Amino acid sequence: MAIHIFCTSCKTSNGLNAKKCSKCGLSFGRDRKYRVCVSLKGNRVTRVVDNLTIARETEAAVKGDMIRGELDINHHKVKSVLKLDDVWKRFLEWAKVNKEKSWMTDEFFYRKHLAPRFGSKPLDGVSSFDLERMKAEMKRATTPQGKLGYSDATIRHVLVLIGHLYKKAREWKLYSGEIPTASVKKPKLDNKVTEFLSAEEMERLLKVLAEWPCRETASFVLIGLFTGLRKSEIRKLRWEHLDLERKTLTVVDPKGRETTTIPINDQAVAIFREIPVVSEYVIPGPDGGIKKTFRDPWYRIREAAGLPAHIRFHGTRHNFASWLVSSGVDLYTVSKLLNHRDVKTSTRYSHLSDDALRRAANLAGEVLTQRPGGQPVSLPEPLKATF
């Protein structure tokens, strides 16, 4: 058995310490490939993979297949042993129908994290130890954004996804073995984090948006700030959903799953009136269709405004709610404006209502100690000292 650096130019093998190909001189960069060669009883199987970690896993998997007789060595074809990729293909077809809002996210995470590690493995070839090792590798890896380590939310999503694949395989009578995620601890998430901008941060952000060269991008953020809509809701927003005369906006197929119409403020109306109509979508993508993503534009605006790195675009929604609650608006009303399915979701903002409650309590004290004409009420001796 052996692992070599594979030259994609002349198809030759080179030692793991080689900097360039010994035959054609091609330099090996970070995107180097690896050739895995496994020999058993005079028979040889080779595979080419993308990185050294996967090469070592492939080497062990192929050897195991050969020993168990699951690999047809004479023709180098795998017998009909169900692989994770096989389940994924079935799952993706199911997800496109039943998970219309999140199947693309599942597809990204499977392609990025699961397929390279486990896609070619049989279902019973993935152990809980393999998943624990994946967790450790993801914590040490550098993300595409240059951060050290993937977030707990990403790691949890990947683990939940592979667990779903195994559960569906059992549900569809394709697999009857153990589910490796059963004994793997998933990171716990604090989903009640509330991102709230101070008055100074809000002022800086609005100033940056007023001067931002791409007005479409600035309008996207302003809509979030003054309506509290989710990013996905803004991306899907069509002109037909707006009634600027009545100052209403219809949120179609939101996360709460029920289409609803909400009132919008004068500032939001002014923002919508300034946006040119170039598509059926209010903020369309480059092709005039639905906008695919808004991650990088938000990063640039956030940096220009000097906002903390932890503030996500979703923070505009939290900020909308937080300012309302801090100004004395009740949680039920805020819940309706945010289109929360359950008013309990809005209780994350309850701590922000303390000042409003205190103002109300003080007002009650003032009202209760005065007659309708403004004359003070005669108070018992124990209470006089407090007023």
Image (spheres, rainbow, N blue to C red):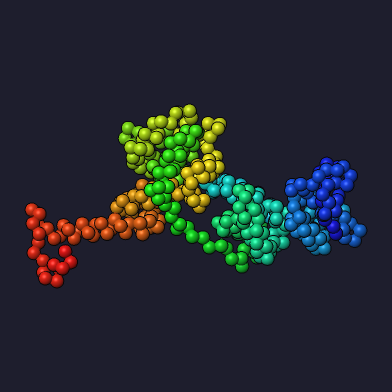
Quarter assignment of residue 44: bottom right
In the image: residue 59, left or right of residue 297: right
Residue at left 29%, top 52%? 328
Residue at left 41%, top 31%? 274
Task: Indicate whether 164 appears above or below 302.
Answer: below
> Of residues 211 and 37, which is closer to you in this image?
211
Picture coordinates of residue 302, whole percent (x, y): 50, 45
> Of residues 243 and 133, which is closer to you in this image?
133
In the image: residue 184, left or right of residue 258: right
> Of residues 145 and 177, which is closer to you in this image?
145
Q: Can I make out residue 339 in this image?
A: no
* Quarter of the N terminus within the rendering: bottom right
Residue at left 37%, top 58%? 347
Looking at the rendered structure, the number of numbered marks drawn on it comes to: 0
Quarter assignment of residue 37: bottom right
Task: Indicate whether 23 appears above or below 213.
Answer: below
Task: Indicate whether 206 appears above or below 37.
Answer: above
The residue lying furthest to the bottom in this view is: 382
Picture coordinates of residue 349, whole percent (x, y): 38, 56
Task: Indicate whether 221 appears above or below 310.
Answer: above
Picture coordinates of residue 250, whole percent (x, y): 39, 40
Picture coordinates of residue 320, whole percent (x, y): 39, 47
Quarter assignment of residue 149: bottom right
* Quarter of the C terminus within the rendering: bottom left
Q: Can I make out residue 56 in this image?
A: yes
Residue at left 83%, top 47%? 20
